[in-house]
Amino acid sequence: MVVKAAKMRRQSAAYVLALVACLVMGGVQAAHAEGGGAASLYLDTFLGIVLLVACSVATASAIALAASHLGHRPKIRGALVAGLGFALTLPAQTPVLPASIAIAFGWIVGREVFGGSERSFVHPAVLAHIFLALTWPQSLGTASQWLRPEREAAVPWNELWMASPGGAIGASSGLACLLGALVLLVLGRISWRILIAVPIGMAIGLGLLGHISTQAPAYALSSHLLMGSVLFGVIFFATDPHSSPTSNSGCWAHGVLIGFVIILLRLANPTSPDGTMSAILVASVFAPLFDHAAVAGRAKWPRASA
């Protein structure tokens, strides 16, 4: 039990370390955009982000602690990572109360009701984001803050490493997201197969569905990867060890499905064009099926899987 708790603490520390760069870069960019050079506005925006993060983390942690006392069981760990990760999926202007209610729902349903600390059908931050999008959609900003649909041509990839202000705090810097991925890969916390499979799934989606939309711009694959919260969501949520497949083949299928669904949602609904969190939710539901298929495949073809 002590070894298991220590492992969970190391895993949480790795994710917090990886998220720090996204938090700093997103906070600086949002504060600079809102402040417009005025020190007081700059400070107010930055403190608002700190308050949003603090309330999200505190809400998830308080519920985890209360549930452990009421249920007379050890506390489910990961509330710090879930609260921090969820806050970074939001724009800097998101009101604190709706965000706190959303992460409470996400933690209760995603960790306390289903899965516990070993297995969850979806990351609590993803579930909280979907809940907030359904209940307070105005809190997540407008479509123009995600994909810049006013442009007819594909957005140059080099312009998208720093996203336009107004979108997710954590997705403000593609370089910060990649730095976080490097940290998690070096520490062995995430699967590289999922990271590679997502662009493959997006390429398949563009190849099969790229002609069906008459409203959404025909962005290139490189632009789709850098727009919205794809990098942030895939790196920190799609690879969550509690809700993603554990088998190698399952990881490939998981990533391909996420990429395909992102393209499907973006082409089918241009007015809400990000689609990353919804795609991760859909793929997470299928994660146990992917693992089951992998086990069945090894039992049927033991030599081929060896």
Image (spheres, rainbow, N blue to C red):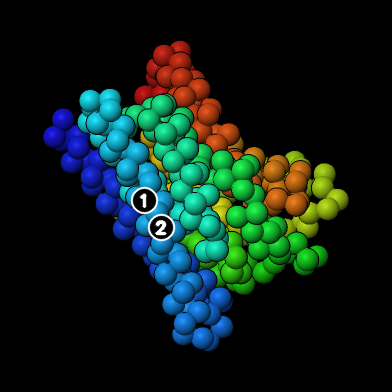
| Residue 206 rendering spot, x and y as whole percentages | 71, 47
Q: Nearer the viewer, residue 188 or 129?
A: 129
In the image, is 15 to the left or to the right of 198? Answer: left
Mark 2, residue position: 53
Residue 298 picture location, percent across and down? 42, 19
Question: Callout 1, which amino acid?
Answer: Val
Q: Are marks 1 and 2 in contact (CB under 8 Å)?
A: yes
303 vs 229, nearest the viewer: 229
Residue at 40%, 64% in the rendered image: 50
Residue nearer the viewer, 253 or 30: 30
For the view shown, which residue lies furthest in the top direction? 300
Q: Secondary structure at mark 1?
A: helix
Quadrant location of residue 7? top left
Find disc 1 in the rendering and name its residue: 57
Note whether residue 73 is visible: yes
* Residue at image coords 46%, 66%: 48
| Residue depicted at x 70% and y 50% | 272
* Residue located at (46% from left, 16% from top): 296
152, above or below 108, in the image: below
Residue at the extreme left: 2
What is the quadrant of the C terminus in the image?
Answer: top left
